[in-house]
Image (cartoon, rainbow, N blue to C red):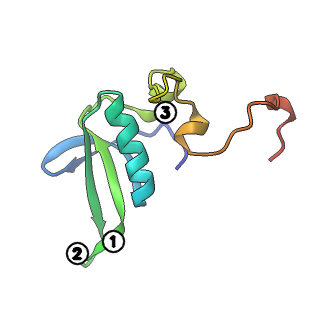
Amino acid sequence: MALRGKHNVAEIDGVRCTIVESGIGKERLDFLSDLLSYNGLEVKTEQEKDQDGNLLETFLLGVKDILFNPTIVVYEQKLFRKDGEVVTATYWEQKKSDTEIPYWQVRR
């Protein structure tokens, strides 16, 4: 999911949390949970339900820090990977990046 800048707050397990992403799969959930936990944030997750109360295959991911905004912390370079590098928007979105090519020559 792209960084959007919108700040949502919801309750997960009875605790008010900033929603980092919703409607995500298990792999994305594990990736973001590990990254956010490594950066000292307390992560809360919940499996989403449909209108009838049936569990879906998607998850809701939040952090207990109500002031946390993923867009701001990524672009202000306040999150770090386990290898010590700064988390970039490309890394956050789990896209492959070719750092050999200058940005003005990359074609989409």
Q: Kindly identify the residue that appears in the image at 43 percent across and 46 percent down.
A: 31
Task: Please tell me whether mark 1 sits on a helix, a strand or a loop.
Answer: strand
Task: Indicate which disc residue 71 carries.
Answer: 3
Measured in 3D between alpha carbons, the distance from the residue under mark 1 to the one under mark 3, in whole angstroms, is: 27 Å
Residue occupying the point 44% across, 29% down? 82
Name the mark nearer the viewer: 2 or 1. Answer: 1
Q: In this view, does 60 lie to the left or right of 77?
A: left
Packing grade of label 2 (10 A; few <14, some 14-19, many >=20) is: few
Kind of residue at disc 2: Gly
The residue tagged 2 is 53
Q: Can residue 50 be seen in this snapshot?
A: no
The amino acid type, in three-letter code, at marker 1 is Leu
Dot 1 and dot 3 residues touching (CB under 8 Å):
no
Mark 1 or 3, nearer chain start? 1
Location of residue 47 in the rendering, given as x and y in whole percent from the top left corner: 28, 62
Image-quadrant location for residue 68: top left
Instruction: Kindly identify which residue carries mark 1.
Output: 56
Q: Are marks 2 and 1 in contact (CB under 8 Å)?
A: no
Q: Residue 99 carries which label?
A: none
Counting residues from the start of the chain, the first of labels 2 and 3 encountered is 2
Residue appearing at x 33%, y 71% in the figure: 56
Residue at left offset 35%, top offset 28%: 39
